[in-house]
Image (cartoon, helix red, strand yellow):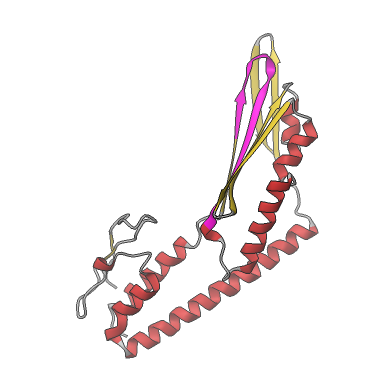
């Protein structure tokens, strides 16, 4: 393979791998403190609708389980709120093309001590107290609880499936190197067929030119950045 081709294919492959690690689920928690010792806790979950793919059945099963738990009120935050018996509770959700893409659950706690109960099953020690008109919130990280047998088994299965996928991808990339070494004129066509949604076509070198820059595309299709690749 020509010396300039391998860095180009490797850089493009790494660019695609980086895009694969976008988290399919994003979670956030907001605490709003109200007068008279009340507090509102809001948990938000965002699910990437593009993460569902037949190429990753394990991910599909986990996302399907999470969507079901959110809609049925069986997720972690639903159980946490239920345990502290909030004064008021609200649940809203959003769907995209029939799939749950977001869920938000809010609970109003009618006493400072209840905030500690919300985080009782986490590794955080949370204390909220009001003394002589002064409110004090203390959050102390604790020692994480030991994983259960089921959690360890789930992690082993997840890592096993992920490792197999990465090994298969890298093996396919090596096969691509070998084939392009014998067919250098097909370099640009192959890269655009595989990575056309990730890189900008104008950044690929013409035949006989050395690669100078690869321009990743944003999801909207515009050029996100330009970074020159050092020559090997």
Instruction: Give the prevailing secondary structure in the magenta stretch.
Output: strand
225 to 36, vertically: above or below: below
2 to 165, vertically: above or below: below
Image quadrant where residue 36 sits = top right
Residue 27 at x, y = what percent?
A: 59, 45
Nearest the camera: 140 or 181?
Answer: 181
Q: Is residue 35 magenta?
A: yes
Residue 156 at x, y = what percent?
A: 70, 66
Image quadrant where residue 195 sits = bottom left
The quadrant in which the N terminus is found is bottom left
Residue 118 at x, y = what percent?
A: 73, 34
How many numbered discs, if any? 0
Residue at (76%, 51%) from the top-left corner?
146
Query: Left or right of 215: which side holds 143?
Result: right
121 to 228, vertically: above or below: above
Q: Is residue 146 visible to us here?
A: yes
Query: Left or right of 50: which side holds 39?
Result: right
Residue at (70%, 19%) from the top-left corner?
129
Region of the chain picked out in magenta, as a range: 30-49
Residue at (65%, 70%) from the top-left corner?
160
Query: Left or right of 217: which side holds 205?
Result: left
Q: Is residue 143 visible to us here?
A: no
Query: Left or right of 187: which side holds 54?
Result: right
Residue 109 at x, y = what percent?
A: 71, 25
Furthest residue toward top: 132
Nearest the camera: 57 or 72?
Answer: 72
Q: Is residue 207 magenta?
A: no
Furthest residue toward bottom: 182
């Amino acid at each position: 393979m020509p010396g300039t081709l391998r860095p180009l294919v490797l850089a493009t492959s790494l660019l695609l791998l980086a895009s694969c690690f976008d988290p399919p689920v994003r979670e956030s928690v907001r605490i709003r403190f109200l007068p008279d010792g009340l507090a509102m806790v809001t948990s938000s979950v965002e699910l990437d609708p593009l993460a569902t793919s037949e190429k990753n059945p394990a991910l599909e099963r986990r996302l399907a389980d999470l969507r079901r738990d959110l809609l049925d009120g069986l997720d972690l935050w639903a159980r946490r709120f239920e345990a502290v018996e909030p004064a008021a509770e609200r649940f809203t959700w959003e769907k995209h093309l029939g799939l749950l893409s977001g869920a938000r659950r809010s609970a109003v706690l009618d006493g400072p001590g209840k905030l500690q109960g919300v985080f009782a099953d986490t590794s955080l020690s949370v204390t909220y107290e009001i003394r002589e008109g002064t409110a004090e919130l203390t959050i102390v990280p604790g020692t994480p609880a030991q994983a259960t047998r089921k959690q360890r088994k789930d992690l082993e299965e997840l890592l096993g499936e992920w490792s197999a996928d990465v090994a298969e991808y890298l093996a396919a990339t090596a096969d691509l190197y070998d084939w392009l070494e014998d067919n250098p004129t097909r370099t640009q066509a192959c890269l655009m067929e595989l990575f056309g949604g990730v890189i900008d076509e104008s950044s690929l070198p013409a035949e006989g030119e050395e690669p100078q820059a690869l321009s990743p595309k944003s999801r909207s299709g515009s050029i996100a950045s330009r970074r020159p690749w050092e020559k090997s």
